[in-house]
Amino acid sequence: MAQTHARSGQVVSVLPLGDQLGSAKTTALLKAEQLEVIRVVLLAGKEMREHKTPGEITVQCIEGRIEFRTPGAVQVLAPGDFIHLAREEPHSLRAITDASALVTIRL
């Protein structure tokens, strides 16, 4: 079954998942012509291997702690932390604790 994405003008909650985090899955919230928004869920120790995107991205940690790697740095994102990357910049993520993040990709 295809996932339903948010429609123009629709309100979508991105509050922390709390007790439901352990059973949650990564979900694409919006896919539009020039923008994709994803709630990434990573359980402790899990990772997204190094990759790059064709457009600029932002990552905002919603809950937990995430190790965010680029060729030049390793940074830890905590709730409320936000990072921007230029297009085609290699990066990877690894959950230090169960975590979720809001990822925005310019397509």
Image (cartoon, rainbow, N blue to C red):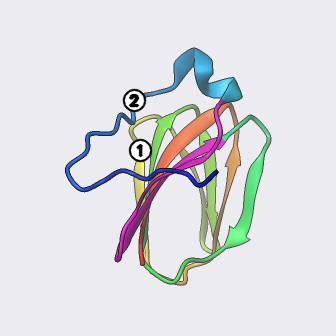
Magenta span of residues: 24-41
Q: Could you say whether the residue bearing mark 1 is in a helix, strand or loop?
A: loop
- Residue located 67% across and 73% down the image: 51
- Give the tally of numbered discs: 2
Side of 22 relative to 73 (left or right): right
Residue 107 drawn above or below residue 75: below
> Badge 1: how crowded within 10 Å, few (<14), some, or many (20+)?
some
Label 2 vs 1, first from the N-terminus: 2
Residue 71, percent from left and from top: 65, 75
Query: Is 42 inside the magenta-drawn segment?
Result: no
- Residue located 62% across and 41% down the image: 41
Q: Could you say whether the residue bearing mark 2 is in a helix, strand or loop?
A: loop
Instruction: Identify the main secondary structure in magenta.
Output: strand
- Residue located 39% across and 38% down the image: 80
Quadrant location of residue 22?
top right
Residue 84, percent from left and from top: 40, 65
Q: Which quadrant is the C terminus positioned in?
A: bottom left
Under mark 1, the amino acid is Asp
Q: Which residue is mark 2?
A: 15
Residue 52 drawn above or below residue 82: below
Residue 85, percent from left and from top: 45, 71
Side of 85 relative to 71 (left or right): left
> Badge 2: how crowded within 10 Å, few (<14), some, or many (20+)?
few
Q: Nearer the viewer, residue 93 or 20?
A: 20
Q: Which mark is residue 81?
A: 1
The reply to whether dot 2 and dot 1 touch (C-beta < 8 Å) is no
